[in-house]
Amino acid sequence: MSELIYLQHTINYYKYGNGPSLLFAFHGFADNADLFQKAGEVLSPYFTIISIDLPFHGKTKWEGDIYKPEDIQQILNLFMVKYNFTSCSMICHSMGGRIIWALLSMMPAQINNLIFLAPAGFQYTFTASRFWCPMWFRRRARKKFEESEGILRFFDIAHKLKLMNRATYLVFKQQLDLPRRRARLLKTWISMYFFPMGAKKKHRNIINDHAIKCFFFYGIKDRITPAKCAIKFVSQLKNTEICLLKGNHFFVRDNLAPQLKIWLTDNSDSFN
Protein backbone atom coordinates (compact mmCIF):
# COMPACT_ATOMS: atom_id res chain seq x y z
CA MET A 1 0.00 0.00 0.00
CA SER A 2 1.39 3.40 -1.04
CA GLU A 3 0.24 6.96 -1.52
CA LEU A 4 0.38 9.53 -4.30
CA ILE A 5 -0.32 13.23 -3.76
CA TYR A 6 -2.54 14.91 -6.33
CA LEU A 7 -3.32 18.56 -5.58
CA GLN A 8 -4.79 18.50 -2.05
CA HIS A 9 -5.81 14.84 -2.32
CA THR A 10 -4.00 11.70 -1.14
CA ILE A 11 -4.48 8.74 -3.47
CA ASN A 12 -4.06 5.33 -1.90
CA TYR A 13 -2.94 2.56 -4.22
CA TYR A 14 -1.46 -0.94 -4.36
CA LYS A 15 1.36 -1.97 -6.69
CA TYR A 16 1.46 -5.56 -7.88
CA GLY A 17 4.24 -7.06 -9.99
CA ASN A 18 7.02 -5.53 -12.05
CA GLY A 19 6.04 -6.58 -15.55
CA PRO A 20 7.21 -4.71 -18.67
CA SER A 21 3.91 -2.87 -19.26
CA LEU A 22 1.82 -0.65 -16.99
CA LEU A 23 -1.73 -1.69 -16.03
CA PHE A 24 -4.10 0.61 -14.14
CA ALA A 25 -6.86 -1.11 -12.17
CA PHE A 26 -10.23 0.47 -11.30
CA HIS A 27 -12.56 -1.22 -8.84
CA GLY A 28 -16.34 -0.91 -8.69
CA PHE A 29 -18.62 0.98 -6.35
CA ALA A 30 -18.28 0.18 -2.62
CA ASP A 31 -15.13 -1.85 -3.24
CA ASN A 32 -11.46 -0.91 -3.02
CA ALA A 33 -8.11 -1.37 -4.72
CA ASP A 34 -7.16 -4.65 -3.05
CA LEU A 35 -9.86 -6.26 -5.20
CA PHE A 36 -7.15 -6.97 -7.77
CA GLN A 37 -4.55 -8.53 -5.47
CA LYS A 38 -5.03 -12.15 -6.57
CA ALA A 39 -5.56 -11.25 -10.24
CA GLY A 40 -2.51 -8.99 -10.01
CA GLU A 41 -0.35 -11.93 -8.99
CA VAL A 42 -1.46 -13.81 -12.10
CA LEU A 43 -0.88 -10.82 -14.37
CA SER A 44 2.42 -9.74 -12.81
CA PRO A 45 4.64 -11.42 -15.46
CA TYR A 46 3.03 -9.16 -18.05
CA PHE A 47 2.31 -5.96 -16.12
CA THR A 48 3.26 -3.58 -13.37
CA ILE A 49 -0.19 -3.15 -11.85
CA ILE A 50 -1.27 0.07 -10.15
CA SER A 51 -4.60 -0.48 -8.40
CA ILE A 52 -6.16 2.77 -7.19
CA ASP A 53 -8.62 3.45 -4.39
CA LEU A 54 -11.05 5.71 -6.25
CA PRO A 55 -12.25 8.91 -4.53
CA PHE A 56 -14.55 8.27 -1.53
CA HIS A 57 -13.36 4.63 -1.43
CA GLY A 58 -10.78 2.71 0.53
CA LYS A 59 -8.04 4.79 2.11
CA THR A 60 -7.94 7.55 -0.51
CA LYS A 61 -8.46 10.97 1.09
CA TRP A 62 -10.42 13.07 -1.38
CA GLU A 63 -10.80 16.65 -0.17
CA GLY A 64 -13.91 17.54 -2.12
CA ASP A 65 -17.43 16.44 -2.96
CA ILE A 66 -16.91 15.44 -6.63
CA TYR A 67 -14.30 14.21 -9.05
CA LYS A 68 -14.22 14.34 -12.84
CA PRO A 69 -12.52 12.45 -15.69
CA GLU A 70 -9.85 15.15 -15.85
CA ASP A 71 -8.85 14.33 -12.27
CA ILE A 72 -8.40 10.64 -13.03
CA GLN A 73 -6.42 11.40 -16.18
CA GLN A 74 -4.04 13.70 -14.31
CA ILE A 75 -3.60 11.09 -11.58
CA LEU A 76 -2.67 8.51 -14.21
CA ASN A 77 -0.20 10.93 -15.75
CA LEU A 78 1.50 11.32 -12.37
CA PHE A 79 1.78 7.55 -12.03
CA MET A 80 3.20 7.20 -15.53
CA VAL A 81 5.89 9.75 -14.75
CA LYS A 82 6.57 8.14 -11.36
CA TYR A 83 7.07 4.67 -12.84
CA ASN A 84 8.59 5.82 -16.14
CA PHE A 85 5.95 4.61 -18.61
CA THR A 86 4.62 6.42 -21.67
CA SER A 87 1.67 4.10 -22.37
CA CYS A 88 -0.61 1.89 -20.33
CA SER A 89 -3.33 -0.73 -20.25
CA MET A 90 -6.38 -0.74 -17.99
CA ILE A 91 -8.51 -3.26 -16.14
CA CYS A 92 -11.82 -2.52 -14.48
CA HIS A 93 -14.73 -4.04 -12.63
CA SER A 94 -18.33 -2.80 -12.70
CA MET A 95 -18.41 1.00 -12.15
CA GLY A 96 -14.74 1.09 -13.15
CA GLY A 97 -15.98 0.58 -16.69
CA ARG A 98 -17.38 4.10 -16.70
CA ILE A 99 -13.96 5.39 -15.68
CA ILE A 100 -12.44 3.67 -18.71
CA TRP A 101 -15.11 4.92 -21.15
CA ALA A 102 -14.19 8.47 -20.11
CA LEU A 103 -10.42 7.94 -20.30
CA LEU A 104 -10.68 6.21 -23.66
CA SER A 105 -11.80 9.47 -25.27
CA MET A 106 -9.12 11.49 -23.48
CA MET A 107 -5.96 9.43 -24.03
CA PRO A 108 -6.61 6.86 -26.78
CA ALA A 109 -3.08 6.91 -28.21
CA GLN A 110 -1.62 5.92 -24.83
CA ILE A 111 -3.80 2.82 -24.29
CA ASN A 112 -2.63 -0.65 -25.36
CA ASN A 113 -5.06 -3.15 -23.82
CA LEU A 114 -8.39 -2.96 -22.00
CA ILE A 115 -9.57 -5.73 -19.70
CA PHE A 116 -13.23 -5.43 -18.73
CA LEU A 117 -14.58 -7.47 -15.82
CA ALA A 118 -18.38 -7.26 -15.82
CA PRO A 119 -18.17 -3.54 -16.69
CA ALA A 120 -20.92 -0.96 -16.39
CA GLY A 121 -21.87 0.72 -19.63
CA PHE A 122 -23.84 -1.71 -21.73
CA GLN A 123 -27.33 -1.48 -20.32
CA TYR A 124 -29.60 1.41 -19.44
CA THR A 125 -29.65 2.35 -15.78
CA PHE A 126 -32.31 4.77 -14.58
CA THR A 127 -30.25 6.17 -11.71
CA ALA A 128 -27.29 6.85 -14.03
CA SER A 129 -29.37 8.83 -16.53
CA ARG A 130 -28.52 12.50 -16.93
CA PHE A 131 -32.07 13.11 -18.14
CA TRP A 132 -33.96 11.47 -15.28
CA CYS A 133 -31.34 12.29 -12.64
CA PRO A 134 -29.84 15.68 -13.64
CA MET A 135 -27.20 17.43 -11.59
CA TRP A 136 -29.64 19.68 -9.70
CA PHE A 137 -31.58 16.60 -8.60
CA ARG A 138 -28.45 14.75 -7.49
CA ARG A 139 -27.22 17.71 -5.43
CA ARG A 140 -30.62 18.14 -3.85
CA ALA A 141 -30.82 14.44 -3.07
CA ARG A 142 -27.43 14.55 -1.40
CA LYS A 143 -28.41 17.52 0.76
CA LYS A 144 -31.67 15.88 1.76
CA PHE A 145 -30.65 12.26 2.21
CA GLU A 146 -27.00 12.12 3.29
CA GLU A 147 -28.00 12.23 6.96
CA SER A 148 -31.32 10.38 6.65
CA GLU A 149 -32.60 7.07 5.36
CA GLY A 150 -35.18 8.73 3.11
CA ILE A 151 -33.18 7.80 0.03
CA LEU A 152 -34.28 4.21 0.60
CA ARG A 153 -37.75 5.25 -0.56
CA PHE A 154 -36.29 6.55 -3.83
CA PHE A 155 -34.66 3.18 -4.53
CA ASP A 156 -37.77 1.30 -3.41
CA ILE A 157 -39.91 3.28 -5.84
CA ALA A 158 -37.41 2.85 -8.70
CA HIS A 159 -37.40 -0.90 -8.09
CA LYS A 160 -41.19 -1.18 -7.90
CA LEU A 161 -41.53 0.75 -11.16
CA LYS A 162 -39.06 -1.72 -12.73
CA LEU A 163 -36.57 1.07 -13.40
CA MET A 164 -33.91 -0.92 -11.56
CA ASN A 165 -33.38 -4.68 -11.63
CA ARG A 166 -33.59 -6.57 -8.35
CA ALA A 167 -29.93 -7.53 -8.18
CA THR A 168 -28.82 -3.90 -8.55
CA TYR A 169 -31.48 -2.75 -6.10
CA LEU A 170 -30.30 -5.17 -3.41
CA VAL A 171 -26.65 -4.16 -3.86
CA PHE A 172 -27.40 -0.45 -3.48
CA LYS A 173 -29.80 -1.00 -0.60
CA GLN A 174 -26.96 -2.52 1.40
CA GLN A 175 -25.04 0.75 1.02
CA LEU A 176 -27.72 2.98 2.56
CA ASP A 177 -27.86 1.80 6.16
CA LEU A 178 -25.10 4.04 7.56
CA PRO A 179 -24.46 7.79 7.05
CA ARG A 180 -20.89 7.24 5.82
CA ARG A 181 -22.10 4.72 3.25
CA ARG A 182 -24.87 7.04 2.09
CA ALA A 183 -22.35 9.87 1.79
CA ARG A 184 -20.08 7.70 -0.36
CA LEU A 185 -22.95 6.63 -2.58
CA LEU A 186 -24.29 10.16 -3.05
CA LYS A 187 -20.89 11.74 -3.73
CA THR A 188 -20.06 8.99 -6.21
CA TRP A 189 -23.46 9.34 -7.85
CA ILE A 190 -22.89 13.07 -8.34
CA SER A 191 -19.40 12.48 -9.72
CA MET A 192 -20.60 9.82 -12.16
CA TYR A 193 -22.69 12.51 -13.86
CA PHE A 194 -19.44 13.58 -15.58
CA PHE A 195 -18.58 10.08 -16.81
CA PRO A 196 -20.19 8.40 -19.84
CA MET A 197 -23.25 6.40 -18.88
CA GLY A 198 -22.42 3.79 -21.46
CA ALA A 199 -20.28 2.65 -24.36
CA LYS A 200 -21.14 4.44 -27.60
CA LYS A 201 -20.21 4.37 -31.26
CA LYS A 202 -17.36 6.82 -30.63
CA HIS A 203 -15.80 4.41 -28.11
CA ARG A 204 -16.04 1.55 -30.59
CA ASN A 205 -14.41 3.71 -33.26
CA ILE A 206 -11.58 4.75 -30.96
CA ILE A 207 -10.86 1.13 -30.03
CA ASN A 208 -10.82 0.04 -33.66
CA ASP A 209 -8.91 3.05 -35.02
CA HIS A 210 -6.16 2.71 -32.41
CA ALA A 211 -6.07 -1.11 -32.57
CA ILE A 212 -6.63 -1.43 -28.83
CA LYS A 213 -6.97 -5.03 -27.72
CA CYS A 214 -10.03 -5.65 -25.56
CA PHE A 215 -10.82 -8.59 -23.31
CA PHE A 216 -14.23 -9.00 -21.67
CA PHE A 217 -14.81 -11.38 -18.75
CA TYR A 218 -18.23 -12.01 -17.22
CA GLY A 219 -19.60 -14.23 -14.49
CA ILE A 220 -22.03 -16.63 -16.08
CA LYS A 221 -24.58 -15.93 -13.30
CA ASP A 222 -24.21 -12.14 -13.39
CA ARG A 223 -27.60 -10.40 -13.10
CA ILE A 224 -26.27 -6.86 -12.66
CA THR A 225 -24.14 -6.50 -15.80
CA PRO A 226 -24.89 -9.63 -17.84
CA ALA A 227 -22.70 -10.52 -20.79
CA LYS A 228 -25.65 -10.48 -23.21
CA CYS A 229 -25.76 -6.68 -22.96
CA ALA A 230 -22.24 -6.38 -24.39
CA ILE A 231 -22.44 -8.89 -27.23
CA LYS A 232 -23.51 -6.43 -29.95
CA PHE A 233 -20.80 -3.91 -29.02
CA VAL A 234 -18.12 -6.57 -28.76
CA SER A 235 -19.06 -8.09 -32.12
CA GLN A 236 -18.18 -4.76 -33.80
CA LEU A 237 -14.64 -4.63 -32.39
CA LYS A 238 -11.64 -5.81 -34.37
CA ASN A 239 -9.32 -6.96 -31.59
CA THR A 240 -11.42 -8.47 -28.86
CA GLU A 241 -12.52 -11.55 -26.97
CA ILE A 242 -15.37 -12.27 -24.57
CA CYS A 243 -15.16 -15.03 -21.96
CA LEU A 244 -17.72 -16.41 -19.52
CA LEU A 245 -16.39 -17.53 -16.16
CA LYS A 246 -17.86 -19.21 -13.12
CA GLY A 247 -19.55 -16.87 -10.67
CA ASN A 248 -21.85 -13.85 -10.50
CA HIS A 249 -21.17 -10.12 -10.70
CA PHE A 250 -18.69 -10.34 -7.83
CA PHE A 251 -16.50 -13.11 -9.25
CA VAL A 252 -13.40 -10.90 -9.34
CA ARG A 253 -12.20 -11.15 -5.75
CA ASP A 254 -12.44 -14.91 -5.23
CA ASN A 255 -12.99 -16.62 -8.56
CA LEU A 256 -11.11 -14.63 -11.19
CA ALA A 257 -7.46 -15.48 -10.47
CA PRO A 258 -7.56 -19.28 -10.96
CA GLN A 259 -9.77 -18.98 -14.05
CA LEU A 260 -7.58 -16.20 -15.46
CA LYS A 261 -4.52 -18.40 -14.95
CA ILE A 262 -6.15 -21.16 -16.98
CA TRP A 263 -7.18 -18.66 -19.67
CA LEU A 264 -3.60 -17.37 -19.93
CA THR A 265 -2.31 -20.91 -20.44
CA ASP A 266 -4.16 -20.98 -23.75
CA ASN A 267 -3.66 -17.29 -24.55
CA SER A 268 -0.10 -16.62 -23.41
CA ASP A 269 0.59 -14.20 -26.27
CA SER A 270 -2.49 -12.01 -25.60
CA PHE A 271 -0.54 -9.21 -23.95
CA ASN A 272 2.59 -9.35 -26.09
Image (cartoon, grey):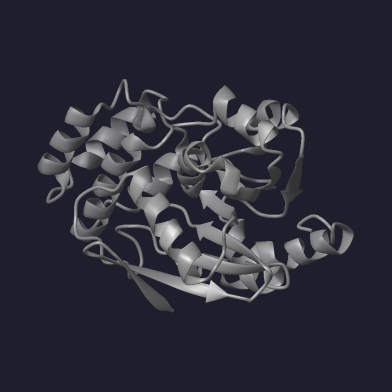
Residue lying furthest bottom: 1
| Vertical placement of residue 89 versus 68, above or below | below
Coordinates of residue 223 in the picture (x, y in percent): 57, 40
Residue under the image location 30 percent in, 29 percent down: 157
Residue at (11% x, 40% y) in the render: 144
- Seen from the viewer's position, the closer of residues 131 and 5 is 5
Q: Residue furthest top?
A: 131
Q: Is residue 111 left or right of residue 232?
A: left
Q: Position of residue 182 (x, y in %)?
A: 24, 52
Quadrant of image for the N terminus:
bottom left
Which one is in front, 190 or 74?
Answer: 74
Q: From the viewer's perspective, is 150 left or right of 196?
A: left
Q: Is residue 135 above or below residue 113?
A: above
Question: Image quarter for residue 131?
Answer: top left
Q: Name the spot of residue 164 as percent of width and height, x first.
A: 42, 31
Q: Is residue 134 above or below residue 73?
A: above
Task: Give the quarter of the image for residue 262.
Answer: bottom right
Residue 116 appears in the picture as rendered: no
**Does 251 sit above or below residue 204?**
below
Whether residue 19 is visible: yes
In the rendered image, residue 237, in percent from the top left (x then y), is placed at 72, 31
- For the C terminus, the quadrant is bottom right
Please report the residue visible at 23 percent of the width from the left and 36 percent of the height from the top: 153
Q: Residue at x 40, y 26 (%)?
A: 163
Which one is nearer the viewer's eye here, 84 or 246? 84
